[in-house]
Amino acid sequence: MAEFADRVVLVTGAARGIGCATAAQFADAGATVVGADLDVEALEAVKELSLRLGGDVGDTDEAHQIIDNTVAAFGRLDVLVNNAGAWLLKPTAEITPEEWDDQLSTNLRSFFLLTRRAYPALAETGGNVVNVASIAALRFTTPHVAYASAKAGVIAMTRDLAAEYAPDVRVNAVAPGPIDTMHITASMTPEEKADFGRRYPLGRMGEPDDVAHAIVFLASPKAAYITGATLPVTGGTELGVPSLF
Ligand SMILES: NC(=O)c1ccc[n+]([C@@H]2O[C@H](COP(=O)([O-])OP(=O)(O)OC[C@H]3O[C@@H](n4cnc5c(N)ncnc54)[C@H](O)[C@@H]3O)[C@@H](O)[C@H]2O)c1
């Protein structure tokens, strides 16, 4: 039987990139997949979804509705993937206080709102949460201090909620490195992408499916004894500087 048969999985930011690949992999594994995103039009094109929900995950009422509508539609929730996120690449001096608040709202507050609202339903099914953090929380990569701070918060939240919610609900995270999605490569040519990828130990940028595989693993019964972990999916990016020889 498929690993996620009869399971209901909610993926935020499912309209494109890592979220879209994750939704497709869960559907392949037999899950009923709900996708939530700001961009409802793009969500329509994700054929693997059984339900599409619009909304801003950083808004309290909209985040709560995403969880409530999922549980109302299918009567249960087994996995929450907090994936929706947005990047603000700017020197610190140019970040306005409003942009700081937006970054923290989309990339951190949303994870708190959705996870807390989902907890009763997840506890009922013995479910789990997978949060999408970032290499930005582990190493300096580029000037985006609001984003990096939010993602570091995601790692702390993952650890704390894993302890608080054990043994009912597991909470884990992945920390992607440079993944070929709109998020960072929208303006790059194929040659630029290949050059960029060669800087890293595994010699290429990651694909959305590389991250989705790790998310599906952490959500699966194979990871039943893993909680509070943050798994880097980075091609070795954080291991060190390129070898001298
Ligand atoms: N691509 C990378 O290299 C990379 C690296 C590290 C971490 N990440 C993280 O992975 C996750 C997915 O990134 P991606 O590269 O697939 O990005 P993406 O931009 O391709 O997709 C993100 C999706 O989230 C949605 N979204 C953004 N803000 C939202 C909000 N407030 N409410 C609801 N939906 C919202 C967008 O509409 C979009 O469909 C993000 O959390 C990102 O920070 C990505």
Image (cartoon, rainbow, N blue to C red):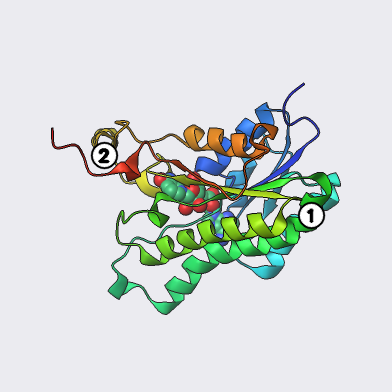
Residue 30, how many percent across, how many down?
73, 28
Residue 130, how many percent across, how many down?
61, 47
- Give left or right: position of 90 versus 28: left
Q: Measuring 39% from the left and 44% from the top, which residue is drawn there? A: 177
Q: Residue 20 occupies which quadrant of the picture?
A: top right
Three-letter code, disc 2:
Phe
Residue 69 is tagged as 1
Disc 2, disc 1: CB below 8 Å?
A: no
Rendered view: 108 above or below 95: above
Secondary structure of the residue carrying tag 1 is helix
- Give left or right: position of 61 versus 145: right
Residue 210, how many percent across, how many down?
48, 33
Could you give the CA–CA distance between mark 2 and mark 1, rounded to whole angstroms?
A: 41 Å
The residue sitting at the top extreme is 1
| Quadrant in the picture for the C terminus | top left
First in sequence: mark 2 vs mark 1: 1
| Quadrant in the picture for the N terminus | top right
The residue sitting at the bottom extreme is 97
Label tally? 2
Q: Is mark 1 within 8 Å of ligand 1?
A: no
Three-letter code, disc 1:
Asn
Q: Nearer the viewer, residue 181 or 121?
A: 121
Residue 200, how many percent across, how many down?
28, 37
Mark 2 — residue? 196
